């Protein structure tokens, strides 16, 4: 073997020296560190990307949750107002039903009173017609009979009869 060559060749049967073993072990260790560092950086970047995506999704979900809570609060307030309006309308409905019932009863009473009044009016008309007829007959008697021939007792009884009939007309 020549000594001027740049590379030193090791014979196969020759054992490596301690320095060579130490250098080889050091190189393997450095290579292991470099590969571990590369793997760590790759994992770290992937985890950071996933964490960034997760943070963005969490922020979006938080924003949507705030929007949903605001809408829910608005709708809850509208529901409360609607329930209050419905309760008020139900109260008004009950009051109107009571008033309608009262008005219906009053109308029925008024119809009955009107029927009674019509009957009374018919009776009064008959009585008035009778009094009118009696007064007309008395006037005819006074007009056709000479004044000396008028019977004062008959006139008195006829006037009492007409006065009693007039009083009956005034009574209900």
Image: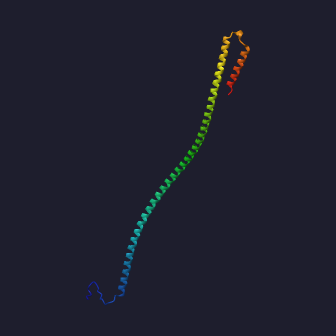
Q: Is residue 79 left or right of residue 124?
A: left
How many labels sit on residues?
0
- Image quadrant of residue 156? top right
- Of the 4 image quadrants, the one containing the C terminus is top right
- Image quadrant of residue 24? bottom left
Q: Is residue 67 left or right of residue 102?
A: left
Q: Nearer the viewer, residue 167 or 148?
A: 148
Residue at coordinates 64% horizontally, 26% vertically from top-left?
123
Where's residue 157, x and y in %?
72, 18
Where's residue 41, x and y in %?
39, 71
Q: Nearer the viewer, residue 8 or 69?
A: 69
Residue at coordinates 37% horizontally, 80% vertically from top-left?
28
Q: Residue furthest bottom?
A: 13
Question: In this figure, which colouring scheme has been used for the structure?
Answer: rainbow
- Image quadrant of residue 26? bottom left
Where's residue 150, x and y in %?
71, 12
Q: Is residue 43 above or below residue 148?
A: below
Q: Is residue 12 left or right of residue 102?
A: left
Residue at coordinates 70% horizontally, 10% vertically from top-left?
147
Q: Is residue 145 above or below residue 19?
A: above
Q: Is residue 119 above or below residue 6?
A: above
- Of the 4 image quadrants, the one containing the N terminus is bottom left
Where's residue 86, x and y in %?
55, 47
Q: Is residue 30 above or below residue 71?
A: below
């Amino acid at each position: 073997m020549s000594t001027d060559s740049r590379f030193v060749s090791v014979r196969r049967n020759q054992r490596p020296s301690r320095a060579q073993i130490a250098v080889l072990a050091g190189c393997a260790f450095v290579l292991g560190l470099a590969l571990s560092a590369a793997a760590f950086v790759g994992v770290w970047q992937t985890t950071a990307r996933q964490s960034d995506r997760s943070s963005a999704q969490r922020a979006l979900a938080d924003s949507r949750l705030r929007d949903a809570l605001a809408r829910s609060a608005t709708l809850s307030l509208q529901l409360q107002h609607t329930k209050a309006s419905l309760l008020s309308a139900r109260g008004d409905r009950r009051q109107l039903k009571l008033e309608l019932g009262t008005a219906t009863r009053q109308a029925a009473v008024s119809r009955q009173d009107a029927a009674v009044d019509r009957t009374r009016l018919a009776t009064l008309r008959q009585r008035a017609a009778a009094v009118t007829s009696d007064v007309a007959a008395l006037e005819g008697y006074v007009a056709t009979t000479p004044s000396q021939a008028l019977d004062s007792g008959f006139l008195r009884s006829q006037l009492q009869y007409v006065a009693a009939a007039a009083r009956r007309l005034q009574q209900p």
